[in-house]
Amino acid sequence: MLKDHKDWLLRCFECGREYEEEPISSRCKCGEVLELVLTKNFPKINDFDGVGVWRYSKTLPISGETQIITINEGNTPLIRAENLAFKEGTKLFVKNEGQNPTGSFKDRGMTVAVTRAKEIGAETLVCASTGNTSASASAYAARGGMKAVVLVPAGKVAGGKLVQAVIHGAKVIRVSGDFDSALELMALEASRRRDLYIVNSLNPFRIEGQKTGAYEIFEQLGKKIPDYVILPVGNAGNISAYWKGFSELKKWGMTDKTPKMIGVQAAGASPLAQLFQNGNDNLVKWDNPETVASAIRIGNPVSWRKALTAVRESNGQLLAVNDQEILKAQRDLASEEGIFVEPASATPLAAIEYLKDSFKKNSVVVSIATGNGLKDQGVIPVDSEKLPLVSNLKELEDYI
Ligand code: F0G
């Protein structure tokens, strides 16, 4: 049992060892990630009350007395993609997580993890990040009156995300090497110090916050479960979180259905898709992953076992799409539906090209648009000097 939340178990996802409080570095002694499990007093749908992530507070391991650190995260729109109709009778929805306070789904998890940090008296948050986690951690640290130390792979993080971390007042440190070395070497090492609280997605409180995306989709579809949920996979926390959310709705008797979970990686950073396609059971990590989708440029996903379980239990799949396909999907979503996402968030749409023939008639498909395109403008070639310039009405008429 968690010592301050008796209804909750904190245990290792792999070996089952139980903990009374977060172990240092938020990892089991065996090296695997942990999970939080509600063991009794299961919530009912009428317990959902309020707006956003904290609407689902009865499903979260935080007590009523704790000061909630929130910037109104969650409650993001589920948008029917009318123009990108890819198959007669199939309904495609985009869950626009880019409308969260710092522009990505990370805020759902961060509000819970940072509230937990507050609950246990932590003063400094630490994370390694491909960009969005650092932006989110920095904002929530500011909101909660805490410090944040963020470690980013040098030269590999989108400019807008770095700007966010800086403006929110975090200590931003570059690490030579990629995200995986930043996480393993730096954040975990740093978190061995009691005074630093790690807020990467291996923190199980973050997963609890992120699972609320599944509850929202269920409610937005009129208490229905979609047939497919497709989302990008980097460190593999979010797909695990969504699966936890959907599985809980079933376990708690709110529905008898779960969706097929489809995880999409960028071809240049696809160790999990490779494992799945080859039918293997152990991850072979990739050195030097490379893709335009910098958010998911990850070669050693820390929650790979959870993600694989999600995909196998749900009868889903893991696949990879290449950079060209990602950029085309990003452009299509922007120009056909008015939704501007960053490259990582366009991977589900790119994957639909491969999946659509397997969708059953009248399927409901939800694509998770994890992050806002405004954060990563560098991937879109716009030479402002080459845009038309007019100085009188005649010239304007010529152009229009
Ligand atoms: N999409 C976006 C926009 C992301 O920023 C990330 C992860 C993912 C998808 C993948 O989610 O890691 O849970 O599988 N970004 C992390 C970061 C790694 O540091 O911001 P995941």
Image: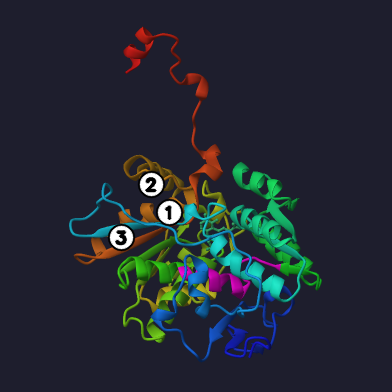
> Where on the picture, by quarter, is residue 7?
bottom right
Say if 163 sits above or below 390 in the image.
below
The answer to which of 137 and 115 lies nearer the viewer is 115
Sequence-first tag of 2 and 1? 2
Q: Secondary structure at mark 2?
A: helix
Identity of the amino acid at label 1? Thr
Q: Is residue 89 shown in magenta?
A: no
Query: Label 2: how many residues lie within 10 Å, few (<14), some (14-19) or many (20+)?
Result: many
Residue 355's disc number: 3
Mark pair 2, 1: CA separation: 7 Å
Query: Label 1: how many residues lie within 10 Å, few (<14), some (14-19) or many (20+)?
Result: many
The answer to which of 124 and 67 lies nearer the viewer is 67
**Residue at 72% from the left image edge and 73% from the top image edge:** 25
Quick check: marks 2 and 1 in contact, CB under 8 Å? Answer: yes
Identity of the amino acid at label 3? Leu
Say if 263 sits above or below 163 in the image.
below
Q: Which residue is mark 1?
A: 347
Quick check: marks 2 and 3 in contact, CB under 8 Å? Answer: no
